[in-house]
Amino acid sequence: MALRHKQVTTVSSFADGTKIPNTQRAVRAYFYVTVWMTCSISVIVFNKWLLAYTKFHFPITLTGWHMAFCSLVGFVCIRVLKITKSHNMSYEDYMRRVLPIGLLYAASLWMSNASYIYLSVSFIQMTKSLMPGLVYVSGIWLGNQKFRLSVAANMCLIALGVVVCGLGEENLVLHGLAKQLTALMFEATRLAMIEILINRKGMKMDPLQSLYYVCPACFCALAVPFYFVEYEEVAAVVQAKSLDIRAHVLLLNGLAAFALNIAVFLLIGKTSALTMNIAGVIKDWMLIFFSYFVFKAPLTALNLGGYVFCCLLRGKVLEICEGGGGLFQPRELHFA
């Protein structure tokens, strides 16, 4: 009796349901990860250079420019080019679901960009190790997460690792640290609110839809602090023509922020949450050494030791949370 052998082709599925061979899947994943890391690093370094190394020391203005630019791009992509559909959200739904997220995101971006004036890129990346813990606390506070002693214990140890990083930071500015920690708290609350106000209602937003709905709310929210904090200084600089930043530089900065959102969209759709979080750790290490060699930000053994400790514990928490569900789920809309 002749035996027939069936050829077995190993295939896997992306997050969007596409089934392709494992080799091709790996190539695509590496490509999307590379594009995302390149865009993310570019935006972070670009913002740092603008805010700390030029005369453009206006974080609210820069954030507002990002919001205005991406609002316009979102409108064109959805209403003109029809790349993706709108949710046709009512005014009541917008005010109840989107506006609170826009307010939190505006505050997060304002504080985060302001911290670049005072802190090194490398230390800012180290403080972001606190994000899973802050999201976890926000989730418990808002009822999204259940308390788990194993997760909470590891989060406390991660916080201890960040404290060690801070003790080893030679150019630590407490004012800047306060802004960065405030930004992380606003961002953690925003992520928890997205789960309550958007995802639980069955309303999923891709980055283009987020640009279309959230960015206008952010822009309006930033108008108030801009008027009271930066308006007079910006007006004086513009009137004196002492600003050494040309319009094409700001346009390029806005395009970089938009490109990052597209890269996040591709990465979320074509890879797993686990892949994105591993890539995020690699990106953070690249930024740490980039900051050291390009911006000459000092690094100490205490800095690096504390951050290694944080990375190892984050991997442990990732394992406890079964591959990244919830706490480590990638989120849309990134500008820094």
Image (cartoon, rainbow, N blue to C red):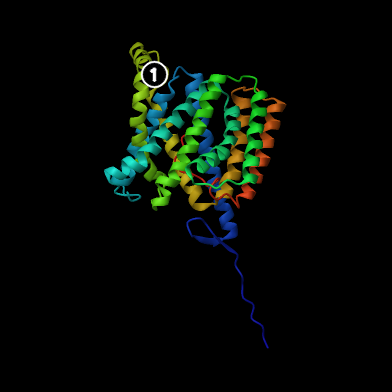
Compare residues 44 and 214 and report the one nearer the observer. 214
Residue placed at 65% from the left, 39% from the top? 311
Q: Position of residue 153 (x, y in %)?
A: 65, 41
Q: Position of residue 98 (x, y in %)?
A: 36, 41
Residue projecting furthest to the bottom: 1
Judge whether 336 appears above or below 178 on screen: below
Residue placed at 57% from the left, 20% from the top? 174
Q: Is residue 212 visible?
A: no
Compare residues 84 and 319 and report the one nearer the observer. 319
Q: Which residue is mark 1?
A: 229
Q: Position of residue 54 (x, y in %)?
A: 48, 18
Q: Quadrant of the N terminus?
A: bottom right
Q: Is residue 97 left or right of residue 300?
A: left
Q: Position of residue 109 (x, y in %)?
A: 45, 31
Q: Quadrant of residue 99?
A: top left
Residue placed at 51% from the left, 48% from the top? 267
